[in-house]
Image (spheres, grey):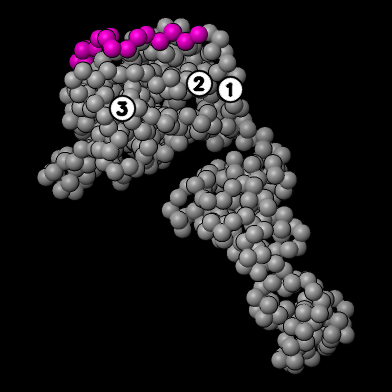
Amino acid sequence: MTAATAELMDYDDVVARYEPVLGLEVHVELSTATKMFCGCANQFGAEPNTQVCPVCLGLPGALPVLNKAAVESAIRIGLALNCEIAPWSRFARKNYFYPDMPKNYQISQYDEPIAVNGYLDVPLDDGSTFRVGIERAHMEEDTGKLTHLGSATGRIEGATTSLLDYNRAGVPLIEIVTKPIEGAGERAPEIARAYVTALRDLLRGLGVSDVRMDQGSLRCDANVSLKPKGQAEFGTRTETKNVNSLKSVEVAVRYEMRRQAAILAAGGTITQETRHFHEDGYTSPGRSKETAEDYRYFPEPDLEPIAPDADWVEQLRRTIPELPWVRRKRMQEQWGVSDEVMRDLVNAGAVELVAATVEHGVSSEAARAWWGSYLVQKANEAGVELDALAITPAQVAAVIKLVDEGKLSNKLARQVIEGVLAGEGEPEQVMKARGLEVVRDDTALKAAVDEALAANPDIVEKIKGGKVQAAGAIVGAVMKATKGQADAARVRELILEACGVSG
């Protein structure tokens, strides 16, 4: 029996017989300018092995120097998660051999992390919240990246060649570890997804990471165990590694619950191991799960302990912004939109862009219309995130004002936005350079109307006969003749005047 066809228990039976216990470990790459312990650039997508130096390659005699900006981000994350910030913490060496860790050890924090004992109140879709306890948030460095070639799955099994890119080795990481999550019951998969979603939103709001799961800057390891209803002792857990989408977190937890329940019900035992998540919805065995003793932790001799000044911590506390979901709820009420509309804006990554556009003096309705529709389309065409488009909220607001002033129609406004995206300048500059401003001169409009009426005598007779709606065809002809630059409302007025009827 393969992993993909493993026996699974019906989910309703699982939650009727067993209580799930979750533990979620989220690794967050910080968006600092440089790596954790050296001056190499911290930039995604560079040519392989171009952002390396003796320190991050672990060459003999190279010594690490701590990145202060990473410490600041770690403290801010801890504060946002309601953690206690340790007055004294230190790094340790986590010893293991993998080809993606050139030193053969990882500098991390073990028994003395920088932030401990916090919580996050996670909003759920039904409007309720679920409190997830935070065990710790600690600093460490990321490993390099392995690319396996010749394997059908992209994993090492069956691969003929493996390529190593050490650019990621040494990138600042914060690992956020929950306390055991109990009491979730049948909602455990949903709560797992909601927690990672909330954490992603929180980290983005703090500005400490781009939290791009598709690029690996936010990764989740999902620990799952089951215990029979009424039993106090936890069951044996598995850890599904590097789950890289919100949906996959939910799917992985649900799958493991069903798989483990089937094994337990048949009298089997769960193997403590890491597991791989496959995008078609199942997990497969990885390796046996090490314990802390296996890593032979010891204090890092080349780095001093961290003792953040209490005043500095309080200064950082004052930089913590309003919780993203609280802010969204407040904006939703101000904008007067439904939960569904707000959810679409959130999914599109448009909420903050809309809010910033409104701050430039335009209506939220117009800002939502542009960011939530046309600009989402342009981002999809370009294959980038919405906030990566080459247009700012101020520029979108300027386009909206030109429409409100009657200088642009919505159709012409799209052409102006295309020009801004193409780097042609500010909206008004693009409008003038492309000759897109709406034609309001009655002399020019009357000439276009007379020409269209002369070309369509049958429609003129219909209008004169009382079928005023037939004027739409003439309006269309005039708009075509003027390349969409005519004021459509004024064109209609001139058509009806010429036909001697009232609108």
* Residue at which label 2 appears: 76
Q: Nearer the viewer, mark 2 or mark 3?
A: 3
Identified by mark 1, the residue type is Thr
* Residue at which label 1 appears: 319
Q: Are marks 2 and 3 in contact (CB under 8 Å)?
A: no
Q: 162 or 41: nearer the eye?
A: 41
Q: Answer few, some or many: residues within 10 Å of disc 2's Cα (few below 14, many 20 plus, some between 14 and 19).
A: many
Identified by mark 3, the residue type is Gly
- Residue 253 seen anywhere in this rendered image of the structure: no
Residue found 77% across the figure and 84% down from its top:
447
Quarter residue 324 falls in: top right
SS state under label 1: loop
Q: Which mark is residue 195?
A: none
Q: Is residue 453 left or right of residue 94?
A: right
In the rendered view of the protein, which quadrant contains the N terminus?
Answer: top left
Mark 2 and mark 3: span between their CA atoms? 21 Å
* Residue at which label 3 appears: 170
Query: Sequence-wise, which precedes: disc 2 or disc 3?
Result: 2
Q: Percent from the top left, x then y, of residue 409?
A: 69, 65
Q: Are marks 2 and 1 in contact (CB under 8 Å)?
A: yes
Q: 328 or 122: nearer the eye?
A: 328
Residue found 37% across the figure and 33% down from its top:
42
Main SS type for the magenta part? loop
Identified by mark 2, the residue type is Arg
Q: Is residue 52 left or right of residue 199?
A: left
Q: Percent from the top left, x then y, of residue 244?
A: 36, 38
Mark 1 and mark 3: span between their CA atoms? 27 Å
Query: Sequence-wise, which precedes: disc 1 or disc 3?
Result: 3
